[in-house]
Image (cartoon, rainbow, N blue to C red):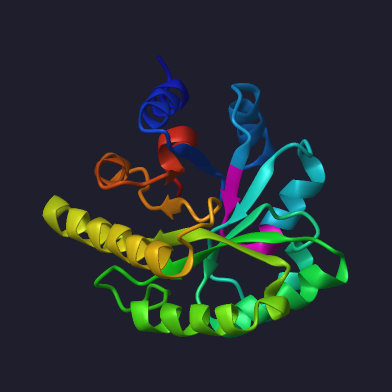
Amino acid sequence: MNNYQLLLDVTKAKDAALIAVSKTKPIEDIKVVYLQGQRIFAENKVQEMCEKYEHLPKDIQWHLIGHLQTNKVKYIIPFVHTIQSVDSLKLLQEIQKEAKKIFRRINILLQFHIATEETKFGLSLPEAQDILEGLQANPELYDCINICGVMGMASFTDDAAQVRKEFASLKNMFIILKNTYFPFTSSFKEISMGMSGDYQIALEEGSTMIRVGSLLFGSRV
């Protein structure tokens, strides 16, 4: 059994989605995984995702998982399926502005800072609550935004207990937001956490999306 089928079986058993992280990988490698049945791919750089979109089948769902600068939003709005890395009100407003121009509604996840590394991006729970309070007060200003859940990256560590604690904290923040702001919104359901090295822990802690690259495509140099 190849890694793709193994991962697919594991995620299906947990009712989770497999996101194939294709960053830095050539189109030929992506096609191999595509032909096995994978349709959800993720990139962390806008330019690379735009280039791959042009040369790959159009039934691919593209997820942007890297830090997104506001001046790059316009390039992906015409085709991106989900932006997983929304970490500020300013970015949310820019997505709304560009999406409204072409009458699209964009799925987004709120990215939380759950790791110990300060270099990682993400919101705190109070920051996310401030954003959502504003959205609730003025829903007409965000009619092209569909907030589907949360995303986070655990610390880069071999300490499984630390990773589990961080994933549990993201799950807890999801529950708080769900109960407070989205109790009757069925589309607010995603918890994107877990990568090649820690996806099993993430699934045990409630992940609904795992973002796997090296297990599918091999190590990056």
Can residue 24 be seen here? no
Q: Count how many numbered circles sit on residues in the image.
A: 0
Can residue 28 be seen here? yes
In the displayed structure, does residue 165 sit left or right of residue 172? left
Residue at (79, 42) in percent of width and height: 55
Q: Indicate the position of residue 28 as horizontal and vertical percent values.
A: 67, 33
Q: Quadrant of residue 61?
A: top right
Residue 163's place in the image compared with 53, above or below, is: below
Asked whether residue 56 is drawn in magenta, I would say no
Residue at (51, 78) in percent of width and height: 132
In this view, the residue farthest toward the top is: 1
In this view, the residue farthest toward the right is: 102
Residue 182's place in the image compared with 203, above or below, is: below
In this view, the residue farthest toward the front is: 184
Q: Indicate the position of residue 116 as horizontal and vertical percent values.
A: 24, 72
Q: Nearer the viewer, residue 213 or 115?
A: 115
In the displayed structure, does residue 5 sit left or right of residue 176? right
Q: Indicate the position of residue 177 as horizontal and vertical percent values.
A: 40, 67
Residue at (62, 26) in percent of width and height: 32
The quarter of the picture where the N terminus appears is: top left
Q: Quadrant of residue 210?
A: top left
In the displayed structure, does residue 188 sit left or right of residue 166? right
Residue at (74, 56) in percent of width and height: 50
Q: Which residues are magenta?
A: 41-48
Q: Indicate the position of residue 103 as horizontal and vertical percent values.
A: 85, 64
